[in-house]
Amino acid sequence: MAGATIGPVNPPALRLPRRLFCVAALGAAAPAWAGAHGQRKVSVDTAARYAGHASIATFAAEVAERRQLPARWLTGRLEQARRSEAVRRLIMPPPRGTAKNWRAYRDRFVEPQRIAAGLAFWRAHEGVLAEAEARFGVPPEVVLGIVGVETFYGRIMGSFRVVDALATLTFDFPTGRRDRSGFFRAELEEFFVWCAREGRDPLWPLGSYAGAMGLPQFMPSSINRYALDFDGDGRVDLDANGADVAGSVARYLNEFGWKAGMPTHYAVTPPSAAEDLATLREKDILPSFTAAQMLERGAGLDEAARAHEGPLAFVELENAGAAPTQVAGTTNFYAITRYNWSSYYAMAVIDLAQALKAAKAGRGTTA
């Protein structure tokens, strides 16, 4: 999804000096970066605020003690958060029986306008993208593939107040799917830690319906743990600073196992025996088989894949009733899925990256 829900991360508690609360506690004016991408458009439900909600005081007291934040500040901001029915609706999975269609999904992202925007971003930030590759091993086109899929290079960063989204998913997570309120409760805590450290009013930041923020759509815990001040200007800005975006995305992938120079996937043909196919499918996107094991199960691999050192995954993408698309994913493919737990997402990032690389080299695109 556009606001990728990044896996839960729990960095050590941050003990912050009280002076850092002054801006947020007083209700800061709109920060300078607010208009970096055009007019601020906010999706705010008219539903009642969370003032008086039974869980607010408990949450505030726990977080205040654990993270050394003022309980009154936490309570005051949470009381102004609103339950969002749009967030509750959007977090739900698609209806049962909805056919997955890789080709249609791919076409949303690998298309001329997004490629043009990606090339412009690359040209504007070529130096820092190269620096990020040198430090973390992640090629520029992969960083750009993620930012392009996530937010169209800043054009679509979300219009939900993050405090509304995270409060809703913490205190009013909808029934009908696996309860992830615990994950969002941890993200709400990390959001307040981030706001306190950066001197931001929690009522101001906007993001996706899941609470992801900025050009790379980092969840609050990932901002706290992985975001970098890559240009050394003294602050981390994932809303408008291309250097910080490049460094932070590359660092994230590196932390989750990205290996410099390793392909993301290889071509594969499925085995003819149903039992062998079922065995390869069982592990889904998790690299679990050596090339030799895949060959033993009847899969077809080219010479490059046969020589690959390390585990592979048999990744299958459905095409709405047509023959599926299948690849042998490496640990680099898996690293991209740590950003968003979806093989469709990872392949869209990879295909957009390849199209950008080809376009920059003057070889046209695969759009």
Image (spheres, rainbow, N blue to C red):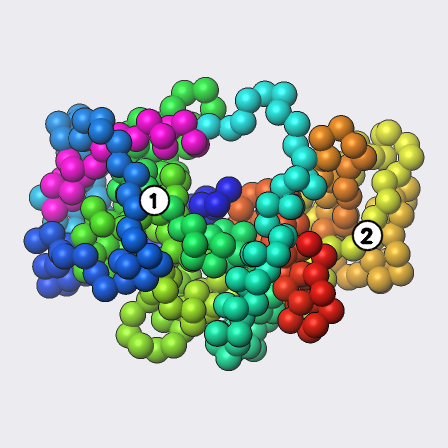
Can you give x and y, in whole percent of width and height, for residue 352 in the image?
Answer: 63, 56
Q: Residue at x 66, y 39 (%)?
A: 104
Can you give x and y, in whole percent of width and height, for residue 278 in the image?
Answer: 79, 32
Tell me the magenta residue range. 73-91
Q: Which mark is residue 285?
A: none
Q: Which mark is residue 267?
A: 2
Left or right: where 10 falls relative to 66: right
85 drawn magenta: yes
Establish if 289 lies above or below 52. Answer: below
| SS assignment at label 1 | loop
Q: Quadrant of residue 307?
A: bottom right
Give the residue at mark 1: 159
Q: Residue at x 88, y 38 (%)?
A: 271
Q: Residue at x 36, y 71 (%)?
A: 229
Q: Are marks 1 and 2 in contact (CB under 8 Å)?
A: no
Main SS of the magenta segment?
A: helix
Q: Earlier in the sequence, mark 1 or mark 2?
A: 1
Front-most of residues 144 and 225: 144
Q: Amino acid at mark 2?
A: Ala
Left or right: where 349 falls relative to 178: right
